[in-house]
Image: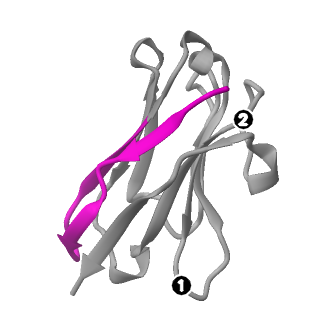
């Protein structure tokens, strides 16, 4: 089993920044692709960003391109989501997910292990 823990959420004003962290147990974490998803009240869960095991391939949802950056440090078994120029519509619960594959996925069904989520609230 892989244990996943997100951190870094909180309250921030529009235009501000946050950095989310996703830490996973086990030294094999670096072999897996990782995604960040978010879900706001009344909306479907969407893939915000994803990164391959190597970190060489990334994906960003259209709504966050140019504002968010996903990266990973395999030595620390950690994936980061740098969130800049935050908007009120970014308010959601953010989840880190890890798949049992080195590749990059965009759908929740592509992922096998999930964290409990971290709350991000952007105020105006």
Is residue 46 a member of the stretch shown in magenta? no
Q: Secondary structure at mark 2?
A: loop
Q: Tag on residue 41?
A: 1
Estimate the x, y position of residue 50 in percent, counting from the top left: 60, 44
Residue found at x 56% / y 26%: 55
Viewer-nearest residue: 96 or 48: 96
Residue 28 vs residue 105: left or right?
A: left
Estimate the x, y position of residue 41 in percent, counting from the top left: 53, 84
Residue found at x 29% / y 50%: 8
| Residue annotated with mark 2 | 99
Q: Is residue 107 visible?
A: no
Q: Residues within 10 Å of mark 1 (few under 14, many from 20)?
A: few
The furthest residue to the front: 1
The furthest residue to the right: 109
Q: Is residue 38 visible?
A: yes
The image's colouring method is one colour
Residue found at x 66% / y 31%: 33
Residue found at x 39% / y 17%: 76
- The image quarter in which residue 101 lies: top right
Q: Which residues are magenta?
A: 1-22
Q: Secondary structure at mark 1?
A: loop
Viewer-nearest residue: 6 or 87: 6
- Position of the N terminus, as image quadrant, is top right
Q: CA distance from mark 1 to mark 2?
A: 25 Å
Viewer-nearest residue: 16 or 114: 114
């Amino acid at each position: 089993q892989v244990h996943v823990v997100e951190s870094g959420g909180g309250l921030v004003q529009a235009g501000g920044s946050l950095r989310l962290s996703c830490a996973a147990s086990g030294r094999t974490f670096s072999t897996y692709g990782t995604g960040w998803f978010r879900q706001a009240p009344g909306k479907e869960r969407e893939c915000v960003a994803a990164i391959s095991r190597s970190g060489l391939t990334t994906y960003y949802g259209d709504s966050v391109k140019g504002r968010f950056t996903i990266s990973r440090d395999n030595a620390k078994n950690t994936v980061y989501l740098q969130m800049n120029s935050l908007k009120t519509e970014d308010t959601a619960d953010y989840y880190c997910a890890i798949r049992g594959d080195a590749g990059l996925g965009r759908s929740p069904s592509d992922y096998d292990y999930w964290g409990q989520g971290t709350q991000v609230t952007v105020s105006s």
